[in-house]
Structure formats: structure tokens, C-alpha cells
Image (cartoon, helix red, strand yellow):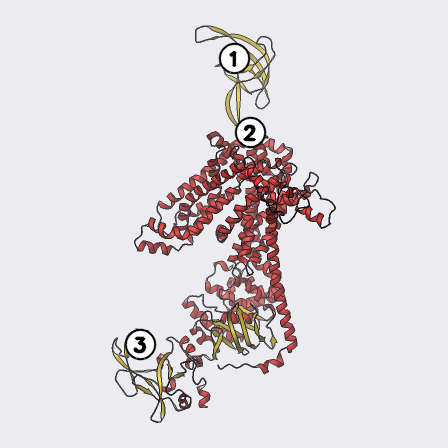
Amino acid sequence: MTETTYPDRIKPITPSAERLDAQRRRAKLAHAVRRASIYILAVAIAIWILLPIWLIASMAFSTPADVRAFPKQILPSPFSTQTLEFFLNTQGIINSTINSLVVAVLALVISTLLAVPAGYAIARYLFPGRDAIRLGILSVRAFPVVVLAVPLAVVFIRLGMFDKVHSLAMMHAALTLPTTILVVASVFASVPYELEEAALIFGCTRAQAFWRIVLPLALPGIAAAAILTFVLSWNEVFAAILLTISNRTLPAQILYTLDKSGDPFKFAGGFFMLVPSLIFIFFIRRYLFNMWGQINK
Amino acid sequence: MAEIVIERAVKRFGKFVAIDDVSLTVHDQEFVVLLGPSGCGKTTLLRAIAGLGMLDDGRIVIDGRDVTYLPPKQRDISMVFQNYAIFPHMTVFDNIAFGLKMRKLAKETIRERVDHAAKLLHIENMLERYPGAMSGGQRQRVAVARAIAYDAKVLLMDEPLSNLDALLRLEMRAELKTLLARLGATTVYVTHDQIEALSMGDRIAVMRAGKILQVDTPTRVYDLPANQFVGSFIGNPPMNFLYGQVRRQDGATKIKIGELLITPPEEMQPPLRAYEGRHIYLGIRAENMEALTQPSPDTLPVTVEVIEPLGSQNLLTAHIEGGMLKISTHPDFPATTGGQIWLRFPVRKIRWIDPDSGEAIVPDLEKVLA
Amino acid sequence: MKKIGLTPYLLLLPSLIYLLLFFAYPMVQSLQLALRREGQYLHLRAEAKEEAAPTGTVAMQTDVTVLDRVRGEELLPNGRTRPVYWFLVEGPDTSGVPVQGWVSQRDVFIESRTESTTARVVNGEATQEWTLDYVRRMVTDFRFGNALATSVLLIVLILPLQFILAIVMALVLQSQIRGSTVFLYIYAIPLGISDLASGILWYSIFTQRGFLNSFLVSTGLLDQPFIFIQAGNQGWMIAAIVLAEVWRATSIVMVIVVSGLQAVSRDVIEAGEVFGANLWQRLRYIILPMLKPSLQVALILRTILAFQVFAVVVAITGGNVITVLANETYRWYDPARFNNPNVAAVYAGFIMLLSLGISFFYLRAVRSQEEATRAT
């Protein structure tokens, strides 16, 4: 090493040791305060999100008497599944839950089957009209359900498709299709085209290359999009309440009977509806930005 | 103008030590290049000088003021970023004026200084444009103009040329060098490109794994690398290292490579005596060996394996016992692939390296001579 | 990219057909429902004959005065005849102008063919016509103004809160904290929660025997529960809806802002720091301007979605005292209540126009602002 340090050269021109120490302490403190306030903010926001969920969960696991009690407990004591059981045993709940599941799964299947080829085309081909189609899909993805539900209900009545589970599923599939196509397209776009070309070089047909190389790589993203469709359909209430009468889905059933129901039913129902969302958002959290990140392009 | 003193700086990221007890002094108006492979801590060191990320230990003094714990704003520094970091939503003018506006300077002063900086970088006719539609070279100029207009005591540059294409880089390199010499700012310049470092810096600080291995002028870093790493990192091709046995013969310390016996110069005799009976590395640059077509005394016969004509020279790759050797020859030198040539090693050009530590056995050869 | 062929179109075709079927076709239907009326009209004749020239048209169920009558004969298939009366009547036509003409006894309901002086039209040709009646019904309904005002008020209250909170969330997530993936998951949870569930959640807090009152009473801040949700307390009801919506729908804005932030390179923000901008200045002059496209998208999306807020309102307030446009749409449609899909379609169309109008306004506002800054 040719460089030497100059401790004695610095001393006269820098602040005294105590002042430096004070400066260092202040800087470290300021830094620590800054970091700590970010953490406090982060935790505060997390509490803001989680607290209502905790409250409703604690209600769902209390006895119906505790649910009606005042003042309420933050912790369910005693812990009980009576309220949830009461909710599930209420007439129409099991049926509407099954309806909800059937609708959501059907919607997921329809929307995924349609979106995979469409997304692939948008991601991989450069063709006249591509941008126009993309823009069109982009613009209908925020299309209000409220606007579509009324005329569709009338059309479904005319076609004899009213109050059918599969009709509602088709409607939900239509609502999520634009988003699904865009997500699937972004997922396919993230699989390098070179991999597909390599597969072609090594003897795959185009279909085989898609089936063996591209699809497996894109599968997690496609699954995320499918889950999103499921959640949207599971949650959707406006079209559900307009398009069904005897085959209500869960949210539609709960909403329809809301003003005739007591608090235990409402709270257990609220909790029961949000549980799948908690699980599914966990699985698709990595893909949230795929869904909205490409929005500016 | 300002001197930068970095004293025993340490920076950790979790368990990883990015800067490991580094000390460095950059003199007033000096141009120091931090050179090293990626991940060596050079950018971290530069950012520590800038105040982007606080040191865990040690201190940084700029112009006699301890700035270790001050934010960038209070350090009187200016910087050119690797990806230019041009504000895309502002015009070129606003980009260059940004720092001056933050300092709340008068409008006329800002206009004046922006115009001046823009002229220096030949972008005075682009001031109203947005960076979005500009080429990499033009953005680079904006980034430099912004740094210059800020008129700080210290100018920091983080691989400013690495995103330009080769030809533009060459052009910009020369231009930057003249510009910075004219401005006389104290400059710290980070790069992984050794040619850039050799051609631009007053001094080069070679870094590896968070440590500075050598700080020296470009010629000394090139000719007298402090250790094996510096020798092989700097120069293209890298320095050759031959493995030789030190032995006592005819009353002198000699080194045996294959059949060749090399007699070190007189001043190297005392330090090398300690290595008798062991092996050391002999470092020699490709252009410092003398290649002959005929056997002659004190030469090492080698077989040429590859000939790469590079225009101004031919680069030969030869196989020797225990490794490869790169030899640079005149294009007319009649070597043939598979043919034999004989190499002579001028002892004054050899760097003697301890095989265990990789360090030069006598780092400051001139001082020994003097 | 592959070479152009028919393939991409074939791959896209099913989706495009499906979207047309479920978006374009209902839109046309909606327009018909809202603006077309099916009616039956009777043509009055110049003479007491089927083939006589028409003198005017009268709508079904119109009351007319009988001015004159003639007795004719009608030939039946079996060869016999039977008497048929024709009446000269006067009544208002479709635009209210009185018209006169002859009608057959089959087309009117009349008490006595020989003596009555009034009759009611009960027959006519089926036709469709444009009408603003349904629009008029919507606009004149006393709840309409209320619903519109509440919808707009909710947007004005909710959006600023959402955007501030979302930007704070995004900045916190991007500030390299430990466990940021956990925080991201937590912040994203409401994405998957329906407005109904969210409404019930906040109902459990604001209801008379809810958590807020439990807290206030057990800490001694109140002696007895305060009834937040009741007809006289619209302010509190709105506040509960705002909180529920901010709680539920901020996540989507957060996700959009985070992906926008990811596109802002760290270098650029650090450059701001090096050139002397403090935290607020960096936010104001660098981060926010660069986030503008993302914020604009989020703003449009959130506005459109805000007009669809429905279940939250019903779950928290019951949907009677406080109502919003989407709730009115449902109320008019609901077979158990007004059972009038036409007015419901007008509401739907109105929401559509509002959404389009506001999106257009945002885009224009942002663009003109950009032009203004570019000009200086």
C-alpha cells in the first residue's frame, strides 16, 4: 500500500473529538428516528387494515349472546363456533355458498380459457390492429357492472337464461376477461421469446414449444389471474342480485336478507365472505403489480 | 477548492462488508479514479462521499470539514450518476437549474450559470427540450452540465460513460478530461474500465473486496502493480505470472523457470534471499518480453499455440510449464502456430511477487534504488 | 415477435366475440330500455270503413268522446251477418292535440253501443317509439337528486383521503424496510374484500352496540352509547361509509402507485437529494410529477368504481336515508319494489355518462396542465 493515513493532519482542521462525537450521535439519532418513524407508520397502517378484520373475526367466533352484548369484547371469550354455525344453518346459506363456488369456478374456467390464447397473441405477435385491440381491452376493464347488469338481466329473461347460475358465471367471466387477458399477456411477455425459439430449433413444433416451454413458465402467473377472477366473482354482488332470484350467490343472499337479519348473522356472514379473499390474495401477491404495473404502457 | 480525506471508512450491508477500513486522500483539484471489478465497493465509497448512505465507522473530511454525518445537501458536492438520473419530466434547462433553484439563487444567476454549463457541453440549443427524446450521449451531457452548473467543491462521477456506445465513449472521454482539467474541480470518478482509468486519472485507486489495494499514478499502477491482482486486473492482456523456483547458485540468488535461470538485479538480491528453496511469481507484461526466432543464451523456449493479429501488434499465446503466457510482438515477427520461439526476460521489467500473499516482495522498488 | 398471419386474429377472436356479446350488445339493449317505449296506437279513420284514410292516432287507454255512430254489417265466415257499430270519436292524439275520426266497436270499450257518449281505446297497432318519459321519471324522482349528491359527495370525500393514504403506503413500502413483503401483503388484503363484507365490518364498528361505542363507553368517554347510524345523523353515516371505502379500496390505488414508483429509478430521487432537495421537495418536484400517469389512471379507475358503491351503503345505512346512484338502479330494477327496468336502465346510462364525462375531464385537465407547464 502506498497510501498512508494522516491522522495528525486532520486533527487541527476538524472539529474536536467531543463535538464530532456529539455530531455523530445526533446523526445516528436522527437516522434512527427517521427509520423508527417509518416503521411506526408501517405498523400503524397495518393495524388500520387488520383491526376491523380482527374485530369481525372475534365476533364470528363468539357466542351469539356475546355478539349482542354491550360493551363488546375485543377477544372472543368464550371462544365459540355457535355464531358461525347459526349462520351456516340459516336457510339458503349453504345453497348460496355452493352457488357462489359454482359461479366463481365457472367464471374462472371461461375467462382463463378465453384469455390464454388472446393474451398469447397480444404478447407474441405484432399484427395490424394490435394496439387498437389492446387499447379496447384496456378501456373496457373499468366498465361499470351497474351499467351492464340491467340490460343483461332483461336479455337473459328474454332468452330464458335468467336466474341461472351459468348465466351469472358468464357475466362475471366477461367482467374479468379484459383484466385476465392483459395479465396473461404480461406474463407471456415475461417469458423470453428466445426460449421458444430454442425449443423450435431443438425440434419442437410451435404448439409443442408453447405446451412444453412457455405454458409451464407462465403457469403461476396464469393461475394468479385465474384466482383473481375467482375472488372478483366471489365478491361481486350487484350483477348477482340482479341476475338471480332463487339461485342467489352468497353475497346476494346476504345482502337480500340483510335488513331482516340480526347482528350475529351479519357478522358471521361478513367474516365468512372475507376468508377466501385473505387466502387468495396471499397466493397472488407477487402478481399484483403484473395486474396494474403495465397500465401506463 | 477542496481536499477530500477518507479515514478508516467502514460500511456494512448486514454481514457483508462493502468498504473495509479504507483510507484515501484526494488532493485539491486532483482527479482520482476508483477502479475495480463490480462489487468491489467503489460505488459504495463514492456514495459515502456523496452522503447517500451513512458510514458505519471512520470519517470523511471535505475541505477541512468533517462531513461524515451530514446529508448530501450540506456537503457541497455534485454528482453524475451512472444512468444519468435526468429528471424526465423537466426540460433540459430545468434539469440543469434544479440544484441552483434548490439553493434559491436569483433567476438571472441561474440563467447565467445554466447557459454557461450548457455551452461548455454544447447543448445550449437543447435547453427547452425534454430528455425523453434525447440520445444517451445527449443525456450524458445534460447530466454533466447539471453537475457542473451546481458548482460544488467536489465532483463525483459514477461510471458516467458506461452506458454509452464504444465510439461515443472514446469521444466523451477526451472531452470530459479537458473539461475537468479546465474546471479544476476535485473529482472522484468511479469506473470498472481500466482504459478509462489509465487515460483519465491523475491517480488511480484500485479496489477489491472493499479494500484499496493500490493508489498510484496510471503509469506506476500499470508498471509497478502492488500485487498480483492489480497486475492482472490492469492492462490488456493482463500481466503474466510465471512460477519459478528460487535457488542459490554461483554465489547469487537465482530463479529457475523450466531450464532457464534468471538472475535478479542486484537490489533484489537481499529481499529474495529469504525465499531460497521456495517458489515465487515473476510478473511480466506481454510487451516487455523479447521474442526471438532462434535459440540464444538466457532464453526460454516456448511453443506458440495461438496467434492473434491485432493490427499494431500480434498477440501470441504460448504454453509453458504450469500455465499460459501472452506475448505481444511486432506484426512482422515470424511466429507460426505450433512453432517454437525463444523468450528473453529483461530483469528490470519483472515484478517479484510473494506466492502466498500475492503482494510484491518490494513494493517501492524506486525507493530502494534511491 | 412472429411474422404476421391469421393466427393472432384467430387466437383473439373468441375473446373479442365474447366481449362484444357482453359489453356491446347490452349497451345497445340498455339504450333501448332507457329511451324506447313499446306502445299500441289506434288509427282513426276518415270514414266508417277499415280501409278509409287515417285522420290521426290515439294511444291505448285514451278516453274519447263519442260524437256520432253508425250501424254497419259484418259478414261472418258462415255466411251470416251481424251488426257492427262505428263511432265518430274525438280525443287527444299522442302529442295532446284533439283529433276526430271513425273507429270500429272492436277497438274501443264502450258501456252502451247506442247511448254512451264516452269510450276508451283498447286496441291498436304495436309500435316502438323514442321517449324521454323514463328519463323524466328518473329526474323527477325525489331520491334522484339525493342519490346524485351523495354519490358525488362520497367521491369528493373519499378520493383525496385514498390518494394520500395510498401514496404514504407506497412510500413506506418502497423505503427498504424489513418485512416489506409482509407489509405489502397486509396492505393488499382489502383488494380481495367485497364492498358488502367491508360494509358489514364497519357496520360492526359503528352500530349502536358496536365496537366504537364499546370503546367510548368502557373508557368513560361516553356515558351511554351514541347512535351513529340513525336518520338524524347523516354526517356520521357518511363518515362510516367514507371510512369503509377508504379502508377497502385504497389498496388498488396503492398497487398502482407502487408500480408507478418502481418505474421511478432510485438514481433520479438520489439526484434530487444530491442537488439539495429535502424530503418534501423531492416528493413535490420529482416523485409526484413522475407518478402523474399512474395517479391519473388510478383516479379514473377509482372514480368509475366509486359510482358503483352500493353494498357498503346498504350494509351500513340500510340504503333508505342515504342512497346512491347504484342503489337507485337496483331499487328501480328490483321486481319486489319498483319493478321498472326502463328507469333502472336510465340510471345505468346516467352512471355511464358520468363516468365517461369525468374520465374525459381528468384527461383534458391533465393535458392542458402539461401544455401550460411546457409553455412556460
Q: Which residue is mark 3?
A: B316
Residue A106 appears at what percent x and percent y? Answer: 45, 40
- Which residue is labeled 2 in the image? C131
| Marked residue chain, label 3 | B
Q: How far across and how far down the image is residue A109, in percent? A: 43, 42
- Residue A56 visible in the snapshot: yes
Name the spot of residue A92 as percent of width and height, x first.
54, 35
- Report the chain holding disc 1: C
A122 up-or-down from A261: above or below: below
Q: Residue at x 40, y 42 (%)?
A: C13
Residue C47 circle label? 1
Q: Where residue A64 sits in the image (x, y, percent)?
A: 62, 41
Q: Amino acid at mark 2?
A: Thr
Which sits in the foreground, B86 or A137?
A: A137
The quadrant of the picture occupied by the C terminus of chain C is: bottom right
Contact? badges 1 and 2 (CB < 8 Å): no
Q: Secondary structure at mark 2?
A: loop
- For mark 2, name the chain: C
